[in-house]
Image (cartoon, helix red, strand yellow):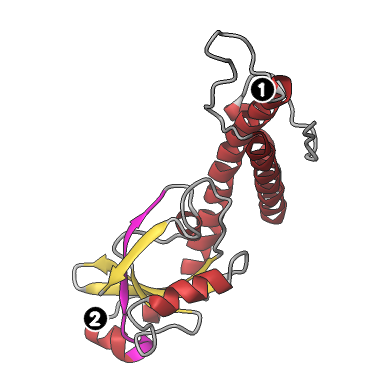
Amino acid sequence: MHTSTVSPVRSGPSDLAGLKDDFHQLALPELQQKKEVMETQMHTLSAVLDSHGVDMHTSLTSRDGFPRADIDVAQVRMTRAQVARLRNDHKALMSVLEERLHERFASTLTTADVPRTSVDLSPAAEQQRHGTPFATVNSVVPGSPAHVSGLRPGDQIIRINHVSHLNHNGLREVADCVQQHEGQAMTVEISRSAHRDWRQHLRVSLTPTRHWGGRGLLGCHIIPC
């Protein structure tokens, strides 16, 4: 007999608009904490399905059309319903969390992180002041840690924690740094095109995680400059 150890998940039809309204009442730390709880629950529920040897799409009936006798069909159905509910809740929460982080990100761009003296820099002046970019963000998956942090396709990476153009070793050091900091915030310095030949120097906080709903720890693809 397989049992689930997660907290009960609410039942009933999804109301994304209502969920977002509820989430908008929470402060940013509360949203982040709720996100971690949801992701832990989804991970635990996935383990329950794995213990039965099924996923969200595996057939629960035999070739004769009868419920399979080798698994607890009732529990699998209940677990699937919980997973589906959590995925919808997580989607709504991530939408609100993204809005909050973008608001905070935008506010920092007008204050300490991006002073006006560092916004309008030519490429040559920027490299002399901030360092040489060594990688370019090629793509960013919506809802991923990279997306939530504010990274955009076309951003040029100057530094990720201790990794720079001097020691990235063909981007291998980037991969090692990301794996070592799973669940921990990393500081990423980037150069972003602002207007014609002028660029911005920005600093964002990026937290690698494997439970955001997609592949990889970051949800972005970077290539050497």
Residue 114, percent from left and from top: 45, 74
Would residue 15 be found to the left or right of residue 106 on screen?
A: right
Q: State which region is magenta.
A: 129-141
- Quarter holding the C terminus is bottom left
Q: From what the image shows, is residue 61 above or below residue 39?
A: above
Nearer the camera: disc 1 or disc 2: 1
SS of the residue under disc 2: loop
Residue 146, percent from left and from top: 46, 59
Tell me the distance, in whole angstroms, between the alpha carbons under discs 1 and 2: 59 Å
Would residue 171 be found to the left or right of residue 3 on screen?
A: left
| Residue occupying the point 59% across, 35% down | 87
Q: Which residue is mark 2?
A: 122
Would residue 133 be found to the left or right of residue 189 on screen?
A: left
Displayed quadrant of residue 58? top right
| Residue occupying the point 36% across, 59% down | 152
Q: Amino acid at mark 2?
A: Ser
Query: Does 66 lie within the magenta span?
Result: no
- Quarter holding the N terminus is top right
SS of the residue under disc 1: helix
Residue 70, percent from left and from top: 67, 24
Q: Which residue is mark 1?
A: 77
Identify the residue at the far left of this view.
196
Tell me, for residue 58, which label it has, or none: none
Q: Amino acid at mark 1?
A: Arg
Displayed quadrant of residue 2? top right
Q: Depth check: 84 or 27 in front?
A: 84
Q: Depth check: 217 or 141 in front?
A: 217
